[in-house]
Amino acid sequence: MIQIPKSMHQKCQNVTSSDRPLPGLTGRSGATLVEVLMALLIFSVAITSVFTLFPISLLTALRATQATNSKFMAENVVEAVRSQPGLLHPPIPGTQVYRGVWQPNFNYAVGDFVSPVPDSGALFPKPNFVYRCTIGTPSMPPGNERSGFTEPDWPQSTGPTVNDGNYTWTRVDYPVGGFSATGAHYVVDPLGRYNNSINPTDFRWFGFNSNAVVNGTAMNPGLPRTKGGFETFGTAIQAFSQPDSWTVLVETVPVSIDLTGANPTVTFPDAVELDGIPIPTSAPFPATPPSPNYRMVLVGANGERTAVSGLLGRINQTVTLSETSLPTFISAAAIPSTVRIENFTPRYTYLMTVRQLGANVPPIVTVVMLFNRSFNPDDEQVYKANFGNSSYSDDTEVTGAIGFDQVKISWAGLQKPLLREGNYIFDARNVLWYKMADISVNEAGEFAIITLTESVQALTVDTGTPANSVGRAILMPGIVDIFEL
């Protein structure tokens, strides 16, 4: 028998189960390089998935914001049109005066234009024409002529006249545009008409052409563009944009306020920069605000109430307000807690296209909502197009096989248009809007075939003359929504 030394026997008894390595393990600590790399791979996949959600969520939030603002603005547009029918008045030839709907016992002048009185609740009259005052009563002293007490029976053809009290009225044709065979369609867009740095006369037409003739096809002019009854950009911007489009330029605690003069004044700290505010800097100041798109908001000392005023002028850091008096919660002893100078920045604006269907058929009015419209003439660039007709042959640039829900456009010799699924394309000949569902671009041929979300309503047809038949397409950027009134 083998005898185990006593000392070794004691050492064996001191070894516990926790001191023995488990089967299959070597007893090392830490992780191998392979394990680290696998962990990094799993982490990178997870974090990449999370990061991809951020741009999607931002885009979704932007679209939701635009949809919400578009909805609010749409309601405002509907109410504005119904309360101010003059917004939709047709284009008037030359520089004559449009007097709105006919009025009884009214003093008109030779050359004035009127429209028949619409039925209650209607947007347009029947017949939907304009009439010019061609003859007054020579024997009547100036200013004493009057229209009759009963609305005349308006003629529906060009030539016949109708008597009305001391006046005679004649039906006139609308200005004829190069996009429409009849010239009856038009666009209500005072902002686009006044926002022009090239030539205001050119902007009586909707649809910009960098070349009067493109590859042998005449392109000018476009659709008549009316002012909607507004004579300046400053007055039109308030009606054709979202009311809350104000941007804060300056916000600070005022040094003092002076209510002793004819107009209150507010003094700003020297550190506040006011040179960018477009108001006069030397007296005497005008009686009305020279820049109606700028205003001052004064917040009461308790921060609960506000007062708003236009700006007349500025001397150094002291600004003179247009309001002759301010609410009682603002005084020299209780100066405002803060004052803000704001600029009206039209983020959401709109225009309206009017498609005439006949003298006694109500036109189709389409409201086009835009976000951050740049008013760049290139945004209205006109391109040759073929709307849904595979048999069209007048202009070879846009011929070829296409479906009834497709449009072929050509930008040969022009800048490539903005082509993006979900955007809109405008048939300027027939005044119809379509949404783009799919786009196939041929860069070499400088053309694209666009699939629409619906079938084409008016096909491009041959006439034997390309200038009179080829479609006119406009792809404006920034369109948020389109709806019919």
Image: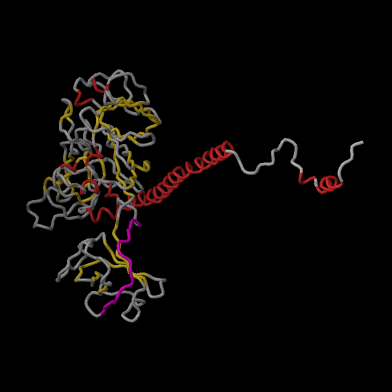
Q: Nearer the viewer, residue 71 or 140?
A: 71
Q: Quadrant of the C terminus?
A: top left
Q: Position of residue 406 (x, y in %)?
A: 35, 26
Q: Nearer the viewer, residue 42 or 423?
A: 42
Vertical relation: 394 (above or below) 54: above
Q: Which quarter of the figure has residue 389?
A: top left
Question: Can you give x and y, in whole percent of width and height, for residue 5 in the image?
Answer: 86, 44
User: Residue 430 lies in what quarter of the image?
Assistant: top left
Q: Nearer the viewer, residue 280 or 204?
A: 280
Query: Which residue sits at x=20%, y=68%?
Result: 313
Picture residue at 21% right of the left edge, 67% below the top: 312
- Asked if residue 404 lies in the magenta stretch, the reply is no
Q: Residue furthest right?
A: 1
- Is residue 254 one of those drawn in magenta? yes
Is 159 or 447 nearer to us in this picture? Answer: 447
Q: From this viewpoint, which residue is outermost toward the left?
A: 139
Is most of the magenta stretch helix, strand or loop?
A: strand
Q: Which quarter of the figure is the N terminus placed in?
A: top right
Q: Quadrant of residue 303?
A: bottom left
Start-end of magenta stretch: 244-259
- Asked if 264 appears above or below 55 in the picture, the reply is below
How many labels sit on residues?
0
- Please, which residue is most extreme toward the bottom here? 333
Image x and y of residue 65, in percent: 42, 49
Give x and y (percent) for residue 350.
31, 47
Give the image's coloring scheme: secondary structure
